[in-house]
Amino acid sequence: MKEERIKFERLKDKVITVQEAVDFFENDMVIGASGFTKAGDSKVVLEALAERAKNENIKITLMTGASLGHDTDGKLAAAGALKKRMPFQVDRTLRNKINAGEVLFIDQHLSESAELLHNKNLPSVDIAIIEVAYIDRDGGLVPTTSVGNSATFAELAEKVIIEINTAIPMEIYGLHDIYKPENYPHRNVIPIVAPWNKIGRKTIAVNPDKIVGIVFTEKKDSPAEIAEPDAKTSAIATHILNFFENEVQLGHLSDRLLPLQAGIGKVANAVLMGFKNSNFYDLTMFSEVLQDSTFDLIDSGKLSFASASSITVSEACYERVFGNLQRYRDKIVLRPQNISNTPGLIRRLGVIAINTAIEFDIYGNVNSTHIAGSKIMNGIGGSGDFARNAYLSIFVTQAASKNNTISHVLPMVSHVDHTEHDVDILVTDIGLADLRGLAPRERAQTIIDNCVHPDFREELQSYFDRACERGGHTPHLLEEAFSWHLRLTETGTMKK
């Protein structure tokens, strides 16, 4: 059975053991590995490298598409195998190492990694590790559940190691659209005018002479943890759906809306699931990740097509999708992330982007990456790609947390990922603030009136009123701007 997964004759003698694969790695190498939000990632080679690093001084710079599954980032970090990591992560162990200064982290817009590599603004890749379902007759690589930066790594790496995952059905062939933009200064328009347009290859091209080894695995992706909608996420979803319905009544949108993008997590899933019982129909997605809610909407008949860079779903949804690929084949496509996240396409298609904030301030600046201004959580991911270029840029968060001791709407954010210029709509479980066409003072009052938890509204109103008395286009009291964060650090609550 394994032999049928290598259809290109010249590569059949390249099968090696995992330990032999790990022997290719040397200290201070730059490694590019497939994987995007736990999907289509290296399942055995990077894990074996972590084991080797426990007994040997070897540190690498690791680039991927986004986060990895199976605790791989954590294992590498705990073993001291990571010198630098980019462009995204979600692992607690790695996060602690980053915040302690033991691992360097480059938090990067997901559309940019491939661009920087092609433009030689990043160190060259020594070894690429690519997970595939099989190798086609012409040597093309058939990706699994994500594309991410795999095509770029395969093209630019000096050596390539292939992980053939036999847990993925070979029928996945044809689900991918691998397109490589031309290099500057001769780049043409990317000819996608609708989410369902396919413009590239079904496989990833690679020079077979660079493939130094092929290992076999039979391990599924780490399942996504899907939390059921709670009172807060359901309230946020209701506010957004009511807003969309009003936009339709005003003639700004149709019942089909425009292509949707939603970040990962329970808020995004709650918002998307809200469409099941709405009046909207024939919806499309142009996003990064296809989650459980994507396939639920397809099954309900509400969603007609979805484009992304990976499939990251729960175990039950995984079985539903890959046990019945024919049902979804003409309704989904997976692309490289420098296509799924490219700013020009987001702007051209008029994407409606819905992403999560850690906190935002009264003028509409959003922090989506740092706690208390310095400790990284996960990373900016693709939210910046979409926020700056979307038809509508929507950010959501709960109004308050930890028994309402922490307000997520503040005088000033402790870290800025998305400036007020890139944010159209802010939503909490309390309400929705439409910031379009508003000057800073108008934005502040709209946010205070609609998004702030009642326990903090009076104090935030006082801050804004006193700041206005002092004057300025964007009024602030600099001596108080971070007082809420400082109070939390000192007393464990933002309340006075």
Image: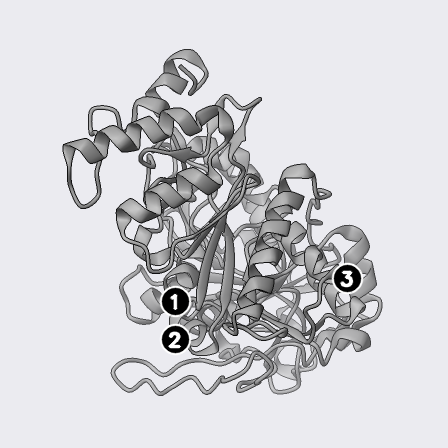
Which residue is disc 3 drawn over? Answer: 167
Q: Most extreme residue toward the left, as rendered?
A: 471
Which mark, residue 23?
Answer: none
The answer to which of 346 and 198 lies nearer the viewer is: 346
Q: Is residue 381 above or below residue 141?
A: above
Along the horizontal axis of the image, is 259 left or right of 13? left
Q: Are marks 2 and 1 in contact (CB under 8 Å)?
A: yes
User: What's the residue type where badge 3 is placed?
Assistant: Ala
Q: Residue at x 21, y 29 (%)?
A: 477
Along the horizontal axis of the image, is 150 left or right of 375? right
Q: Is residue 161 above or below residue 474?
A: below
Between disc 1 and disc 3, the foreground one is: 1
Q: Residue at x 77, y 76 (%)?
A: 171
Which residue is disc 2 drawn over? Answer: 344
Q: Residue at x 78, y 57 (%)?
A: 317
Q: Most extreme residue toward the top, as rendered?
A: 491
Which residue is disc 1 drawn over? Answer: 389
Does residue 359 appear in the picture of this structure? no
User: What's the residue type where badge 1 is placed?
Assistant: Asn
Q: Is residue 391 above or below residue 438?
A: below
**Quadrant including the C terminus:** top left
Q: CA distance from mark 2 to mark 3?
A: 36 Å
Colour scheme in use:
one colour
